[in-house]
Image (cartoon, grey):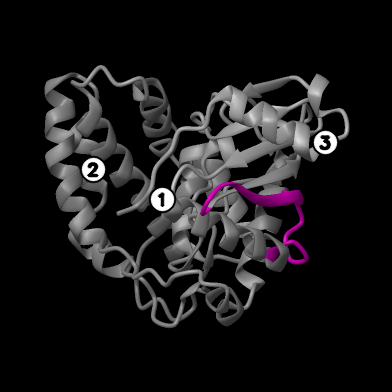
Amino acid sequence: MTQTSAPTADTVRRLVRSLLPDGGGTRIAPVAEGGGQCTWFVGTRHVLRIAPDREAARRRWRELRLRDLVRPHVGVAVPVSVAHGEWAPGLTYTLDRLIPGGSAERRDVSAVGEADLAGLLTGVREVPGHQAEALGVPRAAPRSLEALRTAAERAAGRLAAADEFDPARLHRLTPPAVVQLAPQQGAALLVHHGLRGEHLLVDGDGRVRGVLGWTDAVVGDPTEDIAGLALAVGAPAAVRAATLAGYGVRPCLRGLWLARCDTLTRLADRLHRHDSSLPLLRAQLRRSWEAILLERVTEFRDGTDDPL
């Protein structure tokens, strides 16, 4: 059975005192966005991440090695650990240097920031997949867009009944388009798989300065990262960044429709639960369904000239 434990503020204070010379006087505060009670700000220069169970501990150790692997390839900052170990038997921690910047959920990404995202996508794609797998990064099979569309149709009906979504918008994903947007053979690459807004650190000028959250990385379908960006920064910015990174029409549209189907099913699943995530899910739905010119000018043919 997986061991679970909820670290207390006293646990965190004792750990910080053991790690930092001035730890006794350092202010600590839990990270509210996406961190739960397992991620803490430590003063103004560090972040402490605590694994609450053995599965999380295993993923955190893998993340430490993966961050070292990807850092030379991407053009934005990746967290650097200044200390790591166990805070309880079999349960790990890592003390990382804080990367300046605010969440993309609260700051808009500028045109130059879109170029930063393009560099991120390019860099992740350049990481040798076999090296990532050697670190324990798992393979993930590409998702079926046909299955996602079927689930999204059911979700759209429930959302329409609640006056949350017009299901006619989903008709733009036609059966022929689903076939054309199937995953391409041989495209299994390293995928961050968690490019949510809280994992993208944006400065006051809209530049993307860092990317967090590498624990969910897989070797698989790279369009999942385009989908993540559509949720985080909106469909137009995500497609522009992916295009700058060298992705062609099909991967851009596949990533976009992955995101759109996901937003429908997630919002429908939580709509009547009074879930605190509803505002975020509504924002993600709005972003991913923003219109893009690429959809209006694309006519699928044989796909022989479409890169990536």
Question: How busy is the neighbourhood of tag 3: few (under 14 within 10 Å), some, or many (20 plus)?
Answer: some
Residue 196 in the image: state x and y as whole percent: 51, 41
Residue at numbered disc 3: 20
Mark 3 or 1, closer to the camera: 3
Question: How busy is the neighbourhood of tag 1: few (under 14 within 10 Å), some, or many (20 plus)?
Answer: many
Q: Is residue 258 above or below residue 135?
A: above
Side of 11 where 16 appears, left or right: right
Disc 3 secondary structure class:
loop
Residue at numbered disc 2: 170
Residue 7 in the image: state x and y as whole percent: 52, 32
The residues colored magenta run 70-90
Amino acid, disc 2: Leu
Residue sitting farthest toward the front:
89
> Is 128 within the magenta?
no
Question: How busy is the neighbourhood of tag 2: few (under 14 within 10 Å), some, or many (20 plus)?
Answer: some
Question: Which of the marked residues, 2 or 3, is nearer the chain's N terminus?
Answer: 3
Amino acid, disc 3: Leu
User: Which quarter shows the N terminus?
Assistant: bottom left
